[in-house]
Image (tube, rainbow, N blue to C red):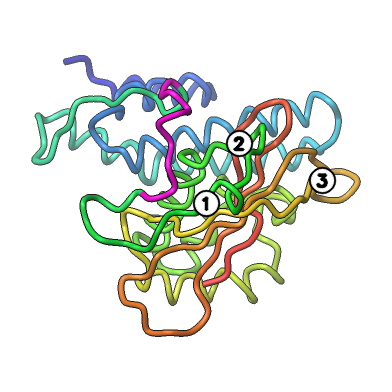
Amino acid sequence: MNDIANQIRDKIADGDLEVSLDLAINFLAGRDPVLHSECIQHKGRLNERSRDYRLQIISAEAMGMTRAQVRHALLDAVLPRIAVLEKGPQPGFAPPVEPLRQQPPQTVTLNFAPQQPSPQPASAASAGNGALADHAAARLLVEEFIKLLATYEVENAAWRAGPFLHRSLLQGEMMQPQFKQNNFYSAHQRFRSYKIPVNFLKAQNTNRTTIGGLRDRDEGEEFVYTLEKTVDNGGMPGTVRVFFPKGGGAPKITLVSF
């Protein structure tokens, strides 16, 4: 087996973060789904910020901050894990799965609980027939977000959450203080109340077609998803809002209420 960790390390030293991420994504597919997804998120954010820099929407300083954060993530989390995986097959190894976008959309449902009784999935009326929404992609996004909350302490998780969030929730590269205080801290405290794998009890189109301000404005559509709890102890159900951008692009979280 090629020494992928050293190849990635050399590319980082050369400043070629894009190739570093490509090497990591290819290697981690089927070996570490969580870190694989995180690398894809980093690649998407890096591409998005590079585009914004070329269009002179962001400054060279902001672009440099993004690259520094991606570089730190590669050195801090990705390289050590790849070095371990290169030593040999790990328990729980699974073959790579087909990319989500290749799955026929007709097979997507809103009840993902495996072989166990659960409330009825959302009806067609409540789910809507949005042209942009991919409920399976939204489920994967929310599930990986909850895994992030479970993996890191709150401030570290907040630092890493950017790729999951719509840019309207970010202030530069950092999470907006208002969202962090009012929503993220609560989500980090209460995520254990919700099932993994994630199960959507209901999906409803909010009829929102634009989001963000002048500089971060996007067109698309937004859905609010109601999550199933591990134990139904009353109280308001947890919800996550996800925005699907017009013209393609990954869905992003716009609000979390746990």
Instruction: Give the percent coordinates (x, y) of residue 130.
Output: 66, 38
Task: Name the image quarter holding residue 55.
Answer: top right
Within-10-Å neighbours for mark 1: few <14, some 14–19, many 20+: few
What residue is rendered at 43% in x and 23% in y?
104
Image mark for residue 58: none
The secondary structure type at the circle numbered 2 is helix
Q: CA distance from mark 1 to mark 3?
A: 25 Å
What residue is rendered at 79% in x and 38% in y?
219
Q: Nearer the viewer's eye, disc 2 or disc 1?
A: 1
Q: Amino acid at mark 3?
A: Thr
Instruction: Give the percent coordinates (x, y) of residue 247.
Output: 72, 26
**Quadrant (top left, top right, bottom left, bottom right) of the N terminus:** top left
Most distant residue in the bottom direction: 234
Q: Amino acid at mark 2?
A: Arg
Q: Which residue is mark 3?
A: 210
The secondary structure type at the circle numbered 3 is strand
Give above or below for 121 relative to 150. above
Most distant residue in the right direction: 214
Question: Is 99 included in the stretch rendered in magenta?
Answer: no
Question: Is 103 included in the stretch rendered in magenta?
Answer: yes
Q: CA distance from mark 2 to mark 1?
A: 34 Å
Task: Name the image quarter holding residue 175.
Answer: bottom right
In terms of secondary structure, what is the magenta stretch mainly?
loop
Camera-nearest residue between 186 and 240: 240
Q: Which residue is mark 2?
A: 45
Instruction: Give the percent coordinates (x, y) of residue 176.
Output: 70, 63
Q: Which residues are magenta?
A: 102-111
Q: Amino acid at mark 1?
A: Ser
Q: Nearer the viewer's eye, disc 1 or disc 3?
A: 1
